Amino acid sequence: MKMKELLLFLSGVLCVSADVLHENIRITGCSESDGEFMYGLDGEEIAYTDFNKQKIIYPQPPFIDPFTYQEGVYELAVGEQQTCKHNLKVDLKAYKNPPMQQDAPSGVMMYTRDEVEFGEKNTLICHVTGFYPAPVNVSWTKNGQKVTGSSINVPYPNKDGTFTQISRLQITPQLGDIYGCAVAHLVLPKPVTKLYEVDSAAQSDPGVGPAVFCGVGLTVGLLGVAAGTFFLIKGNECS
Ligand SMILES: *[C@@H]1O[C@H](CO)[C@@H](O)[C@H](O)[C@H]1NC(C)=O
């Protein structure tokens, strides 16, 4: 009986997660000098095309079962770029070179991927959104000095037609370090800079949570043992 209830409960949970609407996208974008072809799922990159390296890149996180698309995807991407560039020319002429939509980034956020532990490797993330056209250029500084070695994903389309790009920098946070993320975009007269300071508040603090959970858990456990013992003794008395 108990088992059946448990199974019912579990299948309920599974149904809910199956009901979530997922968004799988494939985009082709081009300008006169640049192009993009990518697949995404729920705001994450699955695959994108590196036209310089002439191949599809799969920037999938290590915790998923990795997969690749069938052969011929790179050729498909190249074909679509040709079509896109051709259409762009035709459309621009037909519409008499309309003014381009121009949106500066509406949000730049900086945060670490993991909770900060001084001296332990981490990833600093600069999340830029709400801009058009793509792309943005992101450069990094540490204590005022330029640093290299960051990576950036290809522009990801938002629902409103603007784009998001995320730049990452591997860091080993030390108390007092100040990191800067400078975002350059066509519409900005000069780059917008955000700063991230590694201070003692940044270090993760386990707080009182675990202590409270442990205390409550222990109390409930002990009460259980007490109640169990009580009924055991009572039961023995009755029989
Ligand atoms: C981004 O960098 C590229 C290459 O250095 C440059 O051609 C382009 O103008 C830059 N874009 C912006 C918006 O600064």
Image: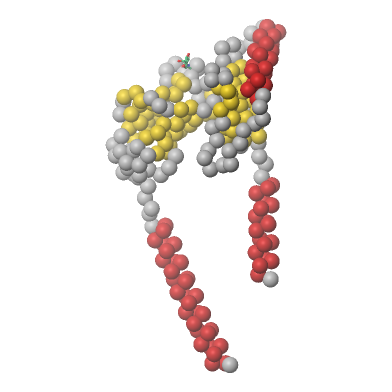
**Residue 131 visible in the picture:** yes
Judged from this view, the residue extending furthest toward the front is 71
Q: Give the residue at the far left of this rendering.
A: 176
Residue 59 spot, x, y in % from top left: 54, 32
Residue at 67% x, 18% y: name it.
80
Instruction: Decide if residue 103 is in sight here.
Output: no
Q: Is residue 91 left or right of residue 213?
A: right
Placement of 234 over or under 212, stated as above or below: below
- Rendering quarter of residue 198: top left
Location of residue 119 in the rendering, given as x and y in whole percent from the top left corner: 32, 41
Q: Is residue 207 above or below residue 20?
A: below
**Residue under the image location 51 percent in, 80 percent down:** 228
Decide which of 29, 220 is in the foreground and name it. Answer: 29
State the image coordinates of residue 107 (x, y, percent, origin top left).
49, 30
Q: How is the image coloured?
A: secondary structure
Which of the pair 84/62 is nearer the observer?
Answer: 62
Which quarter of the figure has residue 100?
A: top right
Q: Position of residue 4 (x, y in %)?
A: 69, 66
Residue visible at 45% across and 74% down in the picture: 222
Tell me if residue 15 comes above or below residue 41 in the rendering.
below
> Which one is nearer the viewer's eye here, 47 or 15?
47
Total number of numbered labels?
0
For the C terminus, the image quarter is: bottom right
Tell me the quarter of the image containing the N terminus: bottom right
Query: Which image quadrant for residue 41?
Result: top right
